[in-house]
Image: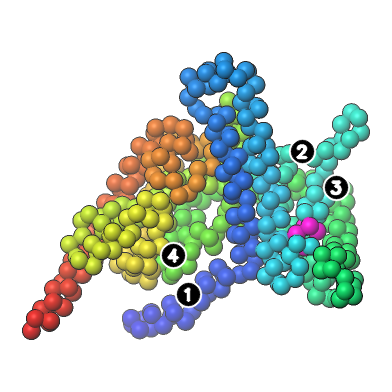
Amino acid sequence: MGQKEKSSFLNEKLIPFFNKIAGSRHLIALRDGMTAAVPMIIIGSIFMMIGQFPIKSYQTFMTQTFGANWATIVQYPTNASFHIMGLIAVAGISYNLAKSYKIDAFSSMIVAIGAFILTIPMQIDKKGALWIPLKLLDSSGLFIALIVGLFVTDLYVWLVHKNLTIKMPDTVPPAVSNSFASLFPGAIVLIVVWLVRLGVEATPMKSIPNVITFFLQAPLGHLTNTLGGALVIEFIVSFLWLFGIHGANTLTGITSPMLLAALAENASAQAAGKPLPNIVTKQFFEIFIRIGGCGATLGLALMIAFMSRSKEFKVLGELVVGPAIFNINEPIVFGLPIVLNYKMAIPYILAPLSNVVMTYTSMKFGWVARTFGVMVPWTTPPLLSGYLSTGHISGAVLQLVEIIVDAMIYFFFFKSMDNDKVKEEAAAEAALQA
């Protein structure tokens, strides 16, 4: 296959295929819906970090100053934010999916929330009052939230398109009209979910959350929390980026529930004083693998900024190094470029995969502390983020080592491009002087 045939195949077949996947309304709804939960997760993480900051002298001081139960009190906001991610996700997914169908998104979201609550087996206290276990609204309910947010919304949209609605006169305010329009579709959706719940309760699984745990979340979570699973995820992310497709955003709807659930399990273990069970979490990828952004490009950005001989690359380096420190690498991905650049494909894939191996191995053998549940914003600069996400200086040291290794992986490819660019600039200058 010649160069033109390869380029034609990429432009006509491969790139449109991946763009179609990335542009799927359901994947976009998953991505945007999960993103809606991130601010609350970060807020809850801040209070969690205050209550669980892993310095013994700090813990002793706070206990002596505010009392033995100060850590419980300060984490009240965590319960109201970090532990409702499933509820936020189902609302966000349903809202964004319904909006993509151009129907009343708010009404669809309300129905989806009701359907989500309907899947949860409620508890009864001694006084006969009903209550919902908070754990079924957080990471434990994420898979249910995904299913309800997608399939229940699709059912609701289908019913609306079948005109199974109550139409009010034009003089009726839109808020009232929309609420009545959702009456029949909403009732049918809840009846369907109710019947499904009754059917599941007649089986040994007993409840919908149990079905998800045993048949979906458990095996997928086990696969994700492995070195092989992490390598596969990061390879796909980097490979998609080589074609200009945001790999992390494309996969986030699939991987985030498992990775956030793993992070939440670590947070619970940290609060209980138990060993952290999971290595591969959302922070594993965001803090230790994608240093400088997808492709682990911080080392490359630093070399472009401080080691380039090419005039063009020196200017580019001034533009890309600042954002790269905050893990924003679109300027380097499209400015160098890396997209559709066969010269940079190997290091762009190899650097993050080496980070996966180094991070997983060092955490597996206890050389580096694992991420303990604090949701550090992905824009936090390296070294600081490594310390905050693990609560230990070993996290920062690992990041420093990874930046050096990543730079070494990129070095020869960068030098080759830099040399080629210097020759091009010299030839252009000679042509002007001739």
Left or right: 387 as drawn, with respect to 229? left
Quadrant containing the C terminus is bottom left
Q: Which comes sooner in the sequence, label 1 or label 3?
A: 1
Check residue 109 for magenta coloring.
Answer: yes
In this picture the colour scheme is rainbow
- Residue that label 3 marks: 201
Q: Earlier in the sequence, mark 4 or mark 2?
A: 2
Camera-nearest label, 3 or 2: 2
Mark 3 or 4, nearer chain start:
3
* Amino acid beneath label 3: Glu
Residue labelled with disc 4: 241
**CA distance separating discs 4 and 2:** 40 Å
How far apart are the alpha carbons under marks 4 and 1?
11 Å
Please state the extent of the stretch shown in magenta in the rendering. 108-112
Amino acid type at mark 2: Pro
Q: Which residue is mark 2?
A: 133
Q: Amino acid at mark 1?
A: Ile
Residue at x 62% of width, y 23% of height:
70
Q: Is residue 333 above or below residue 288?
A: below
Q: Amino acid at mark 4?
A: Trp
User: Residue 52: where, in percent of width, then height?
Assistant: 55, 29
Judged from the image, the secondary structure of the residue bearing numbered disc 1 is helix
